[in-house]
Image (cartoon, rainbow, N blue to C red):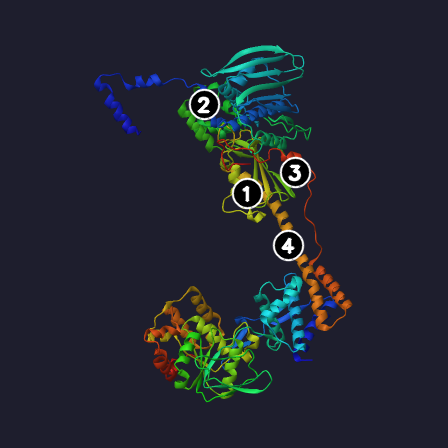
Amino acid sequence: MTEVIKHMKGIANDIYQKIIKKKVPSLDMPIRSLQNVNYDSKIGYFELKGKILSRTLGAATIKTFAQTLLMMNESKKIVETNDIATKREIYYVSKNWGEAMFREQPESDTVMDDIEAMLGFNREQLGFIPEEKGGDVAGRLVVIDQDEEGKTIKIDCTKFGSGAYSVPTSVEGLKFETNAKFILAIETAGMFQRLVKHGYWKKADCILISMGGVPTRACRRFIRRLSDDKKIPVYVFTDGDPYGFLNIYRTLKVGSGNAAHINKYFCVPQAKFIGVTPQDIIDYKLPTHPLKDVDIKRIKDGLKNDPFVQEHQDWDKALKLMLKLGKRAEQQAFAKYNLNYVIDNYLPQKLKNTKSWLT
Amino acid sequence: MSDESQTTLKQGSGEKEGKKPIAYALAEKQRDISVAEFFEKNRHLLGFDNKKKALLTTVKEAVDNSLDACEEAEILPEISIEIIDMKNDRFRIIIEDNGPGIIKKNIPNIFAKLLFGSKFHTMKQSRGQQGIGISAAALYGQLTTGKPIKIISKISPNDPAHYCELHINTQKNKPEILSEEVKEWKKDHGTRIELDLEANYQQAGQSVDTYLKQTAIVNPHCTIIYTNPKAEQLIFARATDMLPKEPKEIKPHPYGVEIGMLMKMMRWSDSKSLQAFFMKEFSRVSSGVAKEICSKAGILPTFKPIEVNRDQAERLIKAIRETKIIAPPTDCVSPIGEELLQKGLKKEINAEFYCAVSRSPSVYRGNPFQVEAAIAYGGELPADKPVRIMRFANRVPLLYQQGACVITESISGTQWRGYGLSQSQNSIPVGPAVIVVHLASVWAPFTSEAKEAIAHYPEIVKEVKLALQECGRKLAQYTHKKRKYTDELKKRSYIEKYMPFIGEALKDLLDLKKSEQETIENMLKEILEHKRGKLEKVEMKNEEYDEEFAKIGSEEPEDSGDEEEKGEDL
């Protein structure tokens, strides 16, 4: 019996024992929010503080309670038969549960996160895989993978022309060969395209990765493993806005409050933020947009509640500066000077001037 | 035209040109205004603004008079009302009661002289007040059809019945007897009137049907037999043989008197001294209080009332205001009573919850009054509409002018949300409820002679609100209990819905047997039921509800094509 199934049976048995002793059963799991995480820069990622949410069986909880047990049961079946199911598929499987089925996928995703947190395993180990693409890779990297028959194959990421290598949903079995000087993780596909098209990775001797917004778990794990294995630094290049700072970069580097139970595996503590910083907006006289209400809210929330921001003075200052400016700028804003200003001027200058980075 | 321009005009056209002062010319236009003209111009004040309302007002005035007369004579009232459709918007109304009858001499004045009556000068709770209603109806009939009002009345089994046909001389406001005779009438005593008028009949809403039904609700001691223009007969049978407590006549209280009234009273008084006058004509005035008033006004208590001038009268009024006088006796008003009010409501409304409150009597401007309120809630009542309001004054239903009435204002001004109804700021609450308010008073302050709405005295607003709040608190207890009950029901069915899935999942996860799965379900049931406690049912069943009765006056109006006040439906 696998570890996972043993764990699930243990939880189910606790509930069973309570019921036959006429005691009200409950499900215990760590609270998944920024309020329940600690951040220590020496450890490098958000760690659970240990606050526990106890879901006692009652009128308000009985539906979720039943759904949690039903989903655990599905996971057990999947693991036993060595199969996999996507989050979307699990949502459809629930349609067979009669009254207990999920109305919308976010409901089933939440229950899945609950189980993950409760068991302390990540969802891939439970047989559930994400839908989303892992991210695009181009540059000085050879990925060593296996084909469907188990034969080792080498994928050269310099040979995709104007296209890219796509990170698979599970990256644990991959190996790497590279001499690159750094990894550049980029927020938008548009900027990634420009850098690939003009062969920036050749000039800078690096690996380019497009995250496409908040990086998926697979993408984060890929970067982490690659960086750890080959001892190469990770630089992050996002839009100059609170979403780029606090959602994309912060999640990549230290994880999120909601997934704190698995941050250990899915963080990249060695990542550094090279731009676009609020100071860049001033220094490069970038064209800007005014901050939206949600931007302002996100900054204030970050200053007040985010343990990562609280630990790092430079981020605290940067966010306050942005609030003062009342403005944000996009990666593409450098096109104001000329289309390749980013390649010829901005990135080389930023890479040289490490003092302009943020931790 | 301003005063100034008038002055210039007079100067310009005046003596300078050697003509007669303009006042002479103006004088030619100054003459008596006949009651008919006054009525024509002010029919809305008396409740005859349109044909539909004219029918209701006529029935109402006659029925109110009959009930007052019966109660005064301590007779259990039995009133029959017949309305006959004569086509072309003409109707004949015949109303007959078993009251004490009217002596021959008074019949013409009562029915054919405006402002003749027994109730204006007394301080006693009654339906009629002014002596204007029934003669106004007779005048309206005369003006619209030219026909006289026909009356037959008998005062005892030993006396013959007296019959007469009357016209009102509209120039002089005097009755004209067209014919009269002695007639055989099988009744022991009673009065029957018959008159034709231009009118419009409508069954639902602000109609005769609704008025009679509501009258029956708050007058359970009377029997009403009603034949509508469709020749359908409805009988509202007496629900109790107990006559309401006889209201007592009281003398006016000094706080309620105004200067004109005071001067008139002094002029007609036969008291030799002011002190004696105050003690005799007013309630709650002892010799000490009378002396105090006189001394504060700077007039000797021995001064003759008849010699008091305007200036002195004003000082007396001021002195009264400054003197502490105990409130008038309040046992003179006759409420319906919580029990009867609730009983009447139950007959009419099929709801789940009823409550009624009678406040203790109170005083506005020296006039004793008493407020009663009742609420019916839930059941078949619509939950998404404003509550239905039923207003009564001295046991008379008020069907018009809801918006102008102090009762409506007090309902809107009461905070209902805490009591389980929804309400937007200062408006009529919304929810499945009927709110009934009754005001009993020796002098009900109506906003107009049509007696459709009660005026806004702060003391009355306060009492109505207190009565409503008292009802509201009872209602809140019920709605809270009910909400808890339905919430609990919902939760229980929710639990039952999902419980089996827990057994099912545990069975699969732990490879349990079917019997073990059943044990889980039974145990879970026990655990959760134990945790939630026993469930108590809250709904009350109304066995007094009378479906046929409730239907009366509530059918959809067939046509509402006349100049009706819109949005005033009851």
**Label 3, on which residue?**
B346
**Label 2, on which residue?**
B40
Mark 4 belongs to chain: B
User: Which circle marks residue B386 in the picture?
Assistant: 1
Q: Residue at x 37, y 84 (%)?
A: A352
Whether pointer 4 and pointer 2 mark residues with C-beta atoms closer than 8 Å, the reply is no
Q: Secondary structure at mark 3?
A: helix
Amino acid carrying label 1: it is Pro
| Distance of label 1 from label 4 (alpha carbons) | 24 Å
| Lower position in the chain sequence, tag 3 or tag 1 | 3
Amino acid carrying label 3: it is Lys
| Lower position in the chain sequence, tag 2 or tag 3 | 2
Q: In the rendering, at what x and y percent does residue A225 appear?
A: 52, 84
Which of these two is toward me, B315 or B158?
A: B158
Q: Quadrant of the C terminus of chain B?
A: top right
Q: In the rendering, at what x and y percent does residue B522 appear?
A: 75, 63
